[in-house]
Amino acid sequence: MSPNLLNVFRSRRSIKEYSPKKVSNEVLFRILEASRWAPSAHNAQPWRFIVIQDSALKQKLAKAMASRWHRDMSKNGVSKEQRESLIKASVERFENAPIIIIACLTMENMDEYPDHRRKRIEYVMAVQSVAAAIENILLAAYGEGLGSCWFCAPLFCQDVVRKIMKIPQHVDPQALITLGYPANRPNPPSRKPLEEIVHQNRWRHTA
Ligand SMILES: Cc1cc2nc3c(=O)[nH]c(=O)nc-3n(C[C@H](O)[C@H](O)[C@H](O)COP(=O)(O)O)c2cc1C
């Protein structure tokens, strides 16, 4: 692997604040094009994407997701004050992102099985494939000088996202990606050392 490519992997960061600079359609096209070339189980390409640039729609989605989050947080004892502050930050973050992409999953071209075990495995394969496409988007965005962040919020309110974005029942929202020119460059969060995550030949048990 070219050392430059390794540097790309090392220096991409999750960016949550963006400058208002507009992202051109050509740049957006190249980022979306990168998603198509991710590997996928059976080459089924189970990813689907909704690109949102309309401010009113971004706001509607952000507020609806936040409202569900607010409800969920009240179930696990987060104080009202803290809930309000988290919700406000979340809505602002999504509203202020120049582009939002909702990454979805469809089982349309995946294999069908009669039993629960293999159905579940097939679903996991689709999730892994969508994740690979998302990573292509993040790296392509970085290559274009943009920042991006992967948010899991839609997983916690799939029905809410489905309703607002008019997503059919057989398509599952998986993630929300924000995109835009970065307003800042965060320091890299730490990574586990290779010795901790890689096992040579067999699992090495530590005390
Ligand atoms: C599946 C997944 C879900 C994530 N969800 C969130 C999220 O909900 N909120 C958030 O701020 N970052 C989220 N992130 C971004 C991670 O926090 C981030 O990638 C990690 O802290 C490492 O930072 P880096 O991307 O700058 O290297 C998510 C990343 C992944 C892969």
Image (cartoon, rainbow, N blue to C red):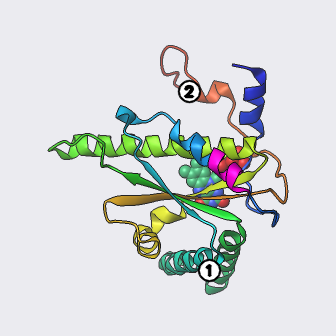
Whether the residues at callouts 1 and 2 have beta carbons within 8 Å, the answer is no
Residue drawn at point x = 84 percent, y = 60 percent = 183
Residue drawn at point x = 29 percent, y = 45 percent = 120
Q: Position of residue 160 (x, y in %)?
A: 44, 74
Secondary structure, mark 2, is: loop
How packed mark 1 is, by other alpha carbons closer than 10 Å (few <14, some 14-19, many 20 or more), is few
Residue drawn at point x = 82 percent, y = 52 percent = 186
Residue drawn at point x = 81 percent, y = 67 percent = 20
Secondary structure, mark 1, is: helix
Of the two numbered discs 1 and 2 in the rendering, the one whose residue sits closer to the viewer? 1
Give me the C-alpha separation between circle 1 and circle 2: 53 Å
Q: Position of residue 191 (x, y in %)?
A: 70, 38
In the image, what residue type sits under mark 1?
Ala
What are the residue bounds of the magenta stretch? Answer: 24-30
- Give the residue number, with chain letter if any, for mark 2: 206
Instruction: Judge by depth and name the residue closer to the eye, 123 or 188.
Output: 123
Q: Main secondary structure of the magenta part?
A: helix
Q: Position of residue 50 (x, y in %)?
A: 51, 61
Quarter of the image for the C terminus: give it: top right
Which numbered circle lies on residue 56?
1
Q: Earlier in the sequence, mark 1 or mark 2?
A: 1
